[in-house]
Image (cartoon, rainbow, N blue to C red):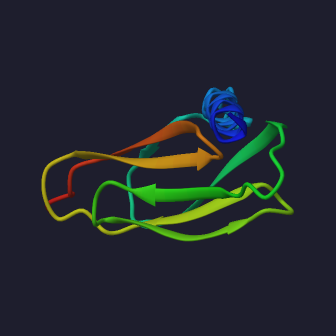
Amino acid sequence: MAKKFFSIIAMFALLFTACETPKEEAVGKFHITTPTTIEVDVPGCFNAYYEIDEAVEGAKIAATSNVEWIHINGIDEEACVIQFCVDENTGEARTGKVEVTYASAKEDITINQAAAVIE
């Protein structure tokens, strides 16, 4: 009888621990303070600024490019700036994006680069 009683108690304990509500993922909020579309005529390095609206402990701003001609040089978290460079364009006008993430929030910066100047 005691064995049956402990088995029932163990089942209830298992049932209640398996039904815990999952913890909500920290989203974090930020926004780009410079224009989110940047027109570029010549190659060079540029800055994009952001502000964190709702901080998440341990979260950091990250930036990636979806094309090989935009390079992320670094992120200065104290100045809230993302530094990136754009290669010279030798062809038609082109568009690329810098994807900025913070915790699970995301925002894009679109880079439009003019076509090469043929002299």
Q: Nearer the viewer, residue 48 or 66?
A: 66
Residue 36: image quadrant is top right
* Residue 34 shows in this picture: no
Q: Quadrant of the C terminus?
A: bottom left
- Image position of 39 (left or right of 5): left
Q: Position of residue 110 (x, y in %)?
A: 42, 40
Q: Quadrant of the N terminus?
A: top right
Q: Position of residue 71 (x, y in %)?
A: 43, 68
Q: Which residue is drawn at 79% across and 41% down?
A: 51
Q: Which residue lies furthest to the bottom in this view?
A: 73
Residue 74: image quadrant is bottom right
How many marks the image carries: the answer is: 0
Q: Which residue is drawn at 71% across and 39% down?
A: 6
Q: Which of 40 and 105 is in front in this view?
A: 105
Q: Where is residue 61 in the image (x, y as percent from the top left)?
A: 67, 55
On screen, residue 95 above or below 13: below
- Image position of 66 (left or right of 34): left
* Residue 109 shows in this picture: yes
Q: Residue furthest front?
A: 1
Q: Where is residue 45 in the image (x, y as percent from the top left)?
A: 53, 67
